[in-house]
């Protein structure tokens, strides 16, 4: 019997457009011999629609003007597990077996929609409320990772309404420029500035404050950026390790999605021993945070071999050529098989079924 899969796309976060690209690729790759698919679009203003138009209109953001949108709302009854579709003259019930929230950033991968899906009794792909909310907070996830014995970059954090000028001066005096100024809860490098002199510090803080009320200032780590992909629930499967070669200041939003000057090397140009160390550290973080479904764990690798934790992405970019699917190819998962495996993992983690490794392809 086919499963009814609901792909959520869009969202209220600044990463709305990224979601449209990821979701389009996921929708097109879902195995229709095993699944039926419904599409639920969330506008930038937070309206939920059942979208029944062409998939191609999602990627270029024409879906909302397509005329194929009907308002939906979650059924807050675990015995039903689905959404209400508010037609012109009736309200229909649309069941959902598994949701794929292809949503990035705030109100997408920060535990909010995950909590709603839990309350509605809807199985979903990806991390649960705890891991999602923890990983969306750069400061709190660093504290946990540091307790595992994995290094983190020196940093300070504060509320943007009470900028601690003396603490910031002391931090800069100890660690020197450059530093990164970041909103604590934002992804895709949104709101982040690399600051190389004191005159740029306050403008960078004001820029970050547009995206969050809490700010962190972090010492810039000299070294390459590396990432490791993982899927699974209680039995995680570790993928490959890639490396980002930068020709600019840092891997900002534009570079992440357009690669104007940065290059991604897969596999990373590192010794096998270093690769294994990164994979081991990534797995330890995944397990400690109680990640489920999938995550990409990112680090900085210094020239002396020291590994510095950067962040956990619980819903990384998900086009066929994005980093995460490419990392999982090394573990034997082609794009279509990866998505089907994630669907199966979502059902297993909620229903208590013993995990099995899906056939790779």
Image (cartoon, rainbow, N blue to C red):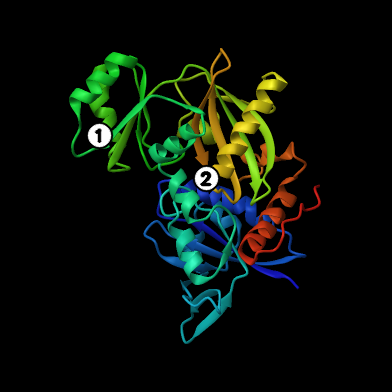
Q: Looking at the image, is 181 positioned above or below residue 222?
A: below
Q: Quadrant of residue 161?
A: top left
Count up the numbered dots. 2
Rendered residue at 24%/24% (across/down)? 168
Q: Quadrant of residue 224?
A: top right
Q: Quadrant of residue 3?
A: bottom right
10 Å crowding of disc 1: few (<14), some (14-19), many (20+): some
Q: Is residue 41 left or right of residue 182?
A: right
Which of these two is toward me, 153 or 254?
A: 153
Which element is circle 2 on? helix
10 Å crowding of disc 2: few (<14), some (14-19), many (20+): some
Residue 322 at least partly seen: no
Query: What is the spatial separation of the Cα atoms under label 1 and label 2, in whole angstroms?
Result: 31 Å
Mark 1 and mark 2 lie on one chain; the one further toward the N terminus is: 1
Residue 205 percent coordinates (x, y): 27, 31
Residue 222 percent coordinates (x, y): 48, 16
Residue 86 percent coordinates (x, y): 47, 79
Report which residue position mark 1 lands on.
Answer: 206
Query: Residue 289 shows which numbered tag?
Result: 2
């Amino acid at each position: 019997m086919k499963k009814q899969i609901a792909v959520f796309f869009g969202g209220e976060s600044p990463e709305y457009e990224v979601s449209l690209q990821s979701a389009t690729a996921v929708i097109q790759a879902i195995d229709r011999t095993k699944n039926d698919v419904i599409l639920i679009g969330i506008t930038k203003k937070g309206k939920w629609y059942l979208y029944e138009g062409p998939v191609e209109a999602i990627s270029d953001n024409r879906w909302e003007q397509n005329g194929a949108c009907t308002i939906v709302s979650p059924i807050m009854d675990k015995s039903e597990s689905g959404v209400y579709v508010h037609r012109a003259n009736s309200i229909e019930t649309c069941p959902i077996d598994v949701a794929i929230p292809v949503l990035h950033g705030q109100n997408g991968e920060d535990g909010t929609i995950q909590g709603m899906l839990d309350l509605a009794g809807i199985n979903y792909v990806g991390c649960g409320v705890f891991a999602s909310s923890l990983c969306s907070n750069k400061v709190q996830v660093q504290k946990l990772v540091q307790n595992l014995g994995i290094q983190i970059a020196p940093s300070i954090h504060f509320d943007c309404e009470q900028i601690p000028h003396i603490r910031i001066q002391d931090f800069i005096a100890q660690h020197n420029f450059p530093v990164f100024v970041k909103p604590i809860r934002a992804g895709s490098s949104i709101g982040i500035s690399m600051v190389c002199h004191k005159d740029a510090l306050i403008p960078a803080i004001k820029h970050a404050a547009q995206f969050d009320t809490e700010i962190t200032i972090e010492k810039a780590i000299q070294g390459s950026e590396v990432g490791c992909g993982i899927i699974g629930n209680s039995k995680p499967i570790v993928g490959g390790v890639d490396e980002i070669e930068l020709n600019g200041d840092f891997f900002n939003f534009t570079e992440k999605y357009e690669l104007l000057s940065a290059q991604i090397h897969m596999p990373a140009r590192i010794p096998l021993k270093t690769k294994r160390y990164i994979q081991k550290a990534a797995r330890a973080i995944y397990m400690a945070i109680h990640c489920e479904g999938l995550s990409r764990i990112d680090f900085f690798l210094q020239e002396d071999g020291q590994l510095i934790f950067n962040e956990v992405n619980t819903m990384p970019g998900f086009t066929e050529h994005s980093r995460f699917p490419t990392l999982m190819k090394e573990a034997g998962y082609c794009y279509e098989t990866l998505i089907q495996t994630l669907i199966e993992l979502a059902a297993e983690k909620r229903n208590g079924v013993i995990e099995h490794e899906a056939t790779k392809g």
